[in-house]
Image: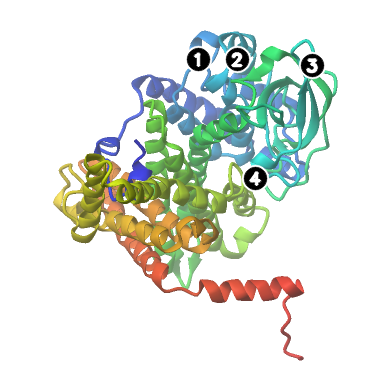
Amino acid sequence: MSVAKGLFDGDILNEHLFPYPRLRDKDREVLGMMVDAIDQFLQPRQQDFRRWDRESAQPAEFIQGLRELGLFGLIIPEELGGLGLSNGGYARVLCQTSMHDSSVSLTIGAHSSIGMKGLLLFGTPAQKARYLPRLAGGELIAAFCLTESGAGSDAASIRSSASRNADGSWTLNGEKIWITNGGIAGLYTVFARTESPDGKITAFIVEAAWPGVSHGAHEDKMGIRASSTTTVHFKDVVVPADNVLDAEGKGFKVAMAILNNGRTGLGGGAVGGMKSLIGLATRQALARRQFGRPIAEFGLIRKKLAQMAIDCYAAESAVWMVAHHVDSGYEDYSVEAAISKIFASEAMQRTAHEALQIAAGAGFMRDLPYEQIVRDARILSIFEGTNEVLRLYVAFSGMKEHGKSLGELKTAMDAIFNHPIKGFGVLGEYAEKRLTHATGVGRGKIQVRVPANLADAAAIYEKYTLELAKASDFLLRKHGSAITDRQQEVERLADIAVDLFVGLCVLSRSIALSSMPGGAGEQAVLIARVFAQQAKRRMAMNVRRIMRNEDEEMNRLAGFLLSGEAYPWDVMS
C-alpha cells in the first residue's frame, strides 16, 4: 500500500513509516570506501569544473576516471560486473558527487537512474547478459530518449515511430531532444509509437553504432553545462526483434516505471548540493565581517542558515524513506517518489538562492561557485517531470481511490435492495470514514511511541491527515469528473500531501535520532518541531484556500493577458 495515497483517505500507514530505515550493511561497507575515493578524485578538480562549465564539455580523460571509479556500475548486480548498490546506496553516491559538481552527477545519474534502468527493470536475461557488463564498466554509457519537440510532459504524444518488418525486426524513425548523455552514449532506451492493440508506445534498446543513429551538437544550456545534452536522430534504424523492452505496446508503462524508480538519484543529488552549500554559507558567514563583527552573529543570517539545514534534513529524510520503499519491494511508491522529487528540488533551489544571498555581491561574481550552483539547480524542478505536472499526479493519484469509494457508494445506493449485504457493507465503510473525518477517532493516528517533546508535531500530522481527506472528499463531491480542470484547487491538495509525507518522514527519522550524543539528537528533535510548525502554517492556509481563494480572478486576468500577448499598462498612458 502507498503511504501517500493513504493520507488522502485519512490513514497513516505506520508500518511503512516507523521505525526510520537504515542503509543496508553491505551498502555501508561499499560506501565507506567509495565516498573517500570520490572525494579524492573530485576535490582537486574544483577549478576544472568551473572551466568545463564555461567550455561546455567534460574531457574524455575525466570520463575515463569515472569509469575507473566504478561510477557507471553502481546499481548493476555484482554478477554482471557492477557494485550491486541498493537505491539508497546509489542515492548516497550521487549525494557525494553532487557536493562537488552537478554535471558529474548528471553524467552518472542519466546513465543509471534512467538510461539503463529499463534494462534492470524489464530486460530479459539475454538482454541483461548482452549489455549490462558493458554498461557496468562504462564501455557503453546509456541515455534515455523520451522527450520530443511538443512532447515533453505529454509523453503519450510522441511522434517517433517504429514499424515492424517481415522478419520481426523494427524500422525506427524520429528525433529526440534534450537528451542527457546524448553525445557520449553508446546505448539508448528509445520510446516510439507503434500500432498495437495493447498500447501505442513501445520501448527499444538501440545501439549508437547502428546505421542511421546520429546526434546533434552540444546544447548551449543555462546550467549543468559540462554534461552532454544533444538531440538524437533515428533514420531508418533497423532494431532487432529481441531489442524490445518488456513487450510491444508497453512503452508508456516502462517509461513511467523508469522515471518513478530513478527519482531517488535526483533527490540524493539535491541533498548533496544542499550539504555543500551549507558548508560554504557557514564559512562565509563566519569569515565576512560587517559593522565590526561576523555576519554570522546577525539574526537574519542565522535564520537563513537554520532554514537551509531544516530543508536539507527534511529532503534527506524523504528521499531515503522512498529509497527504502523501492529497495523493500513495495509495488506502489510512485506518489512518494514524486513528492520527494518536488520537495528536494525546490529545497535545493531555495538553499542555492539563500547561500548566494549570504555571500552578497561576491556571490554574484563568477570567482565563487554560487552563481554556477544557482544555474545548475534551476533544472531540478523541470526534468524527470516538471513539478507542476508531478503535483497534479500526486493529487489525482491520491484522490483516485477516494473517488472510487464515492462511485462504489453511488452503486451501492442504486443496488441496495438487490444486494443488501454488499450495499450496506459499502455504506457502512463509507459512514465509518465520514465519522472518522468528523471526529478524528479511529483512523489517521500515529501508533508508535512518540517522545514527549515530539508529541505536538505528531498531533499536527494526525490532524491534517484528516483535513486532507475531508478536503479531497469536498472537492470530489463539488466538481465530480470536472476536478481535472480545477488545477489550482488540486495543487493545494498536493501541497498538503507533500507537507504530510515529508513531515512524517522527518518525525520518524528524528525519533530514531533523538538519543544521538553530542547535541545532534537534540537538534534533530528541534528540526522536527520547527518543520512541523512551518508545515502546519502552510497546510492551514491551503485548507482555507480550498474554500476561499482568488482562482477565478486569476484566471480572468491570465485570459486578458493572453488575449493581448503583453502587459498593457504604462505610466505614460
Q: Secondary structure at mark 1?
A: loop
User: Could you tell which of marks 1 and 2 lies nearer the N-terminus?
Assistant: 1
Numbered-mark total: 4
Q: Which mark is nearer the camera, 4 or 2? A: 4
Mark 1 or 3 closer to N-term? 1
Gap between marks 1 and 3, in whole Å? 34 Å
Q: Which quarter of the image is occupied by the N terminus?
A: top left
Q: Earlier in the sequence, mark 1 or mark 4?
A: 1
Residue at which label 1 appears: 77
Secondary structure under the numbered disc 2 in the rendered image: helix
- 425 relative to 161 in the view: left or right: left
Looking at the rendered structure, the kind of residue marked 1 is Pro
Element assignment for label 3: loop
Crowdedness of circle 3 by 10 Å Cα count: few (<14), some, many (20+)?
few
SS for dot 4: loop
Q: Is residue 160 above or below residue 489?
A: above
Label 1–label 2 contact, CB within 8 A: yes
Estimate the x, y position of residue 493 in percent, counting from the top left.
Answer: 42, 57
**Residue 555 percent location from the top left of the image:** 59, 71
Q: Left or right of 395: which side holds 111?
A: right
Q: Amino acid at mark 2?
A: Leu
Which tag, 3 or 2, sits closer to the chain's start? 2
**Which label lies toward us, 4 or 3?**
3
Where residue 46 sits: x, y (%)? 62, 40
Name the image quarter holding residue 440: bottom left
Task: Judge the density around disc 4: few (<14), some (14-19), many (≥20) Cα neighbours within 10 Å.
Answer: few
In the picture of the structure, the residue carrying the numbered disc 3 is: 165
- Looking at the image, which is closer to me, 29 or 393? 393
The residue singled out by tag 4 in the image is 154
Residue type indicated by callout 4: Asp
Label 4 – label 3 distance at C-alpha: 28 Å
State whether residue 38 appears in this view.
yes
